[in-house]
Image (cartoon, rainbow, N blue to C red):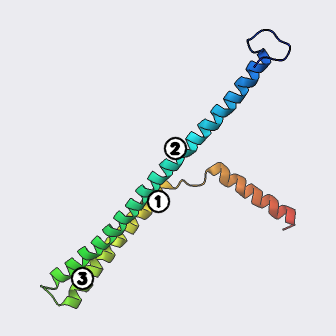
Amino acid sequence: MTSPGRTDPRPSIGELVSSLSEQLSQLIRNEIRLAKAEMAQKATQAGIGIGLFVAAGALAFFGLGTLIATAVLGLANAVAPWLAALIVAIVLFVIAGVLVLIGKKTLDRGVPPVPAKAQESIKADVAALKEGLGR
């Protein structure tokens, strides 16, 4: 890879830099290909994991429905079947109501109020807008 007219068999600085540039470019392309392949493999694994979670959630949902039906059938041995279903429905609504109240309290504690300085700034902006509109 010597230049024409050169007697030294070693490559010149220019040739070395050119070769280095080509090799570096090839190395970067190979690294990008490797990263893409790894990301595709990870995305496939994540997709499979998410699918399994969804299947587990669906089965748990139907399991809960079956458990509720079991409670109705078990209670139907002591009272009329319609009354057993009504009692179980009322219990479920009470549990749902309690969960809503707990969730609301948790959200109220977690959502920060608008900071006082921001409120003052907003009020000043609204006042300036009203003044600018001639009201």
**What's the mark number on residue 5?**
none
Which amino acid type is marked by label 1? Answer: Leu
In the image, residue 45 lies at what x, y percent? 44, 52
Q: How many marks on residues?
A: 3
Pointer 1 residue: 107
Pointer 2 residue: 38
Q: Are marks 3 and 2 in contact (CB under 8 Å)?
A: no
In the image, residue 71 lies at what x, y percent? 20, 77
Q: Is residue 6 above or below residue 50?
A: above
Pointer 3 residue: 87
Along the polypeptide, which appears first: circle 2 or circle 1? 2
Q: Residue at x 38, y 63 (%)?
A: 102
Question: In this rendering, which labeled residue sits more in front, label 3 or label 1?
Answer: 3
Left or right: 116 with respect to 77? right
Mark 2: few/some/many CA within 10 Å (<14, 14-19, 20+): few
Q: Is residue 9 above or below residue 108?
A: above
Near-viewer residue (80 or 121): 80
